[in-house]
Image (tube, grey):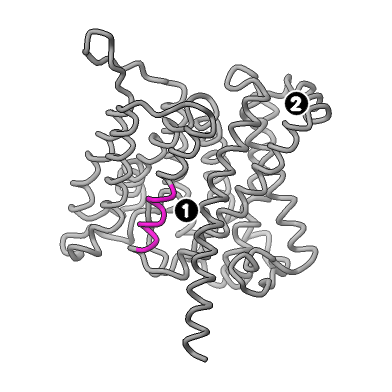
């Protein structure tokens, strides 16, 4: 009987990994296809698309509160989880605003980075988040990573640099940077780094976790509250193009389908990532996240008919390998020489991530 139960748990975990990877891949695909329908970076709707994805996430979250159940665990052969309405106070909402602010603009900058140019290059730039997280956590939160981790950061930066190279006809190399993608990918990394530390700070408040009602509710609440910042940002930056968005959403079935599914898959893959990381150790989660990023980069290149250049393959492999080593080097070589404070934030983690040591940050 025990053996049967163990096999069922392993099967459930495999399913969670599969749906996490598939969800992340399809989020990137739906996100890119919706952006292409809207005219890409020149269409004047990239911020609007990112905000509308969060609107879909917020609607999904409120639907879960309405039925008081979260069906996502069914994907791992588990019963639906209770998801009551959070019993938070006005003071709790105010304390969560810095976290939701960082989450909101990390998402928007990430969407712009992934849709403005090559999704592969956007993913490679986003892979450099540990570099930003290390600097920001050291300067603003007195939470420096270990010396071993600092030594790995140049590998990640080098991988991103290699991916920008272009081989000329004479055999020389130039660096035709997609500055738009690089800039917004870097902004995403900055806000994501702040988001991780703000998440740790907010969840340390006495009783807040209990009042929120679990990590699932925390992610749901973060999506809803982030609209406080995102809607004004959308109005100020692309408000004049709102009629264009309404017309596109009303009359283009493919655009409407891709936009709604990008929001739903974004919400679900973040929940699945949380569930899998809670069920595994840090090293296993690091391997999974590394594999997931590689699968997304290769899969998107195939799906969009944009094969990776040799330089992108080498650069992506180098950066992803660096992120993986960064994630596990303290566990593999011991923690002597580690800096003060907790570990640097998981570069891909949603605010729903638990702050327990078991969910140590991975790339």
Chief secondary structure of the magenta span?
A: helix
Q: Label 2 vs label 1: CA separation?
A: 30 Å
Left or right: where 9 falls relative to 213: left
Report helix, strand or loop for mark 1: loop
In the foreground, 66 or 311:
311
Q: Residues within 10 Å of mark 1 (few under 14, many from 20)?
A: many
Q: Position of residue 324 (x, y in %)?
A: 31, 51
Q: Residue at x 35, y 41 (%)?
A: 132
Badge 2 marks a residue whose secondary structure is helix
Image marks 2 and 1: residues in contact by CB distance under 8 Å: no
- The residue that label 2 is drawn on is 245
288 inside magenta stretch: yes
Residue 220 on image: x %, y %: 65, 57
Which segment is the magenta one? Answer: 284-292
The extreme bottom residue here reads: 1
Q: Is residue 127 above or below residue 306?
A: below
What numbered label is drawn on residue 263? none
Residue 94 location (% of width, % of height): 61, 54
Label 2 or label 1, whichever comes before in sequence order: 2
Compared to residue 312, the image places residue 103 above or below, namely: below
Give me the residue at 65% from left, 31% from top.
34
What residue is at 60 percent from the left and 17 percent from the top? 42
- Residue 218 in the image: above or below residue 141: below
Of the numbered discs in the image, which one, if any, rests on residue 349? 1
Q: Is residue 296 left or right of residue 212?
A: left
Percent coordinates x, y for residue 236 in the rendering: 67, 25
């Amino acid at each position: 009987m025990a053996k049967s139960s163990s096999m069922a748990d392993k099967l459930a975990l495999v399913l969670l990994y599969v749906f996490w990877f598939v969800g992340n891949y399809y989020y990137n695909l739906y996100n890119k296809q919706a952006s292409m329908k809207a005219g890409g970076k020149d269409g004047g709707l990239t911020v609007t698309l990112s905000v509308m994805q969060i609107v879909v996430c917020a609607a999904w979250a409120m639907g879960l509160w309405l039925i008081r159940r979260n069906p996502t665990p069914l994907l791992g052969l588990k019963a639906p989880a209770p998801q009551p309405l959070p019993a938070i106070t006005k003071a709790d909402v105010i304390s969560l605003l810095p976290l939701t602010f960082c989450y909101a603009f990390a998402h928007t900058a990430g969407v712009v980075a992934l849709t403005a140019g090559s999704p592969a290059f956007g993913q490679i730039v986003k892979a450099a988040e540990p570099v930003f997280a290390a600097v920001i956590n050291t300067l603003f939160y007195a939470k420096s990573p270990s010396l071993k981790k600092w030594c790995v950061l140049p590998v990640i930066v080098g991988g991103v640099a290699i991916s920008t190279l272009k081989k000329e006809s004479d055999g020389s190399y130039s660096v035709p940077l997609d500055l738009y993608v690089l800039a917004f990918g870097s902004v995403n990394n900055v806000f994501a780094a702040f988001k991780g530390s703000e998440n740790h700070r907010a969840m340390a408040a006495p009783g807040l976790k209990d009042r929120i009602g679990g990590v699932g509710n925390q992610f749901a609440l973060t999506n809803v509250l982030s609209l406080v910042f995102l809607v004004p940002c959308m109005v100020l930056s692309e408000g004049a193009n709102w009629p264009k968005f309404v017309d596109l959403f009303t009359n283009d079935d493919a655009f409407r389908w891709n936009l709604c599914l990008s929001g739903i898959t974004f919400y679900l893959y973040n929940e699945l990532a949380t569930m899998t990381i809670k069920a595994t150790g840090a090293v296993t989660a690091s391997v999974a996240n590394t594999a997931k990023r590689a699968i997304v980069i290769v899969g998107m290149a195939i799906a969009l008919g944009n094969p990776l250049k040799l330089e992108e393959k080498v650069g992506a492999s180098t950066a992803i390998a660096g992120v993986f080593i960064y994630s596990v080097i303290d566990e593999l070589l011991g923690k002597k020489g580690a800096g003060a404070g907790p570990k640097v934030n998981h570069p891909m983690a949603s605010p729903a991530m638990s702050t327990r040591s078991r969910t140590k940050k991975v790339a």
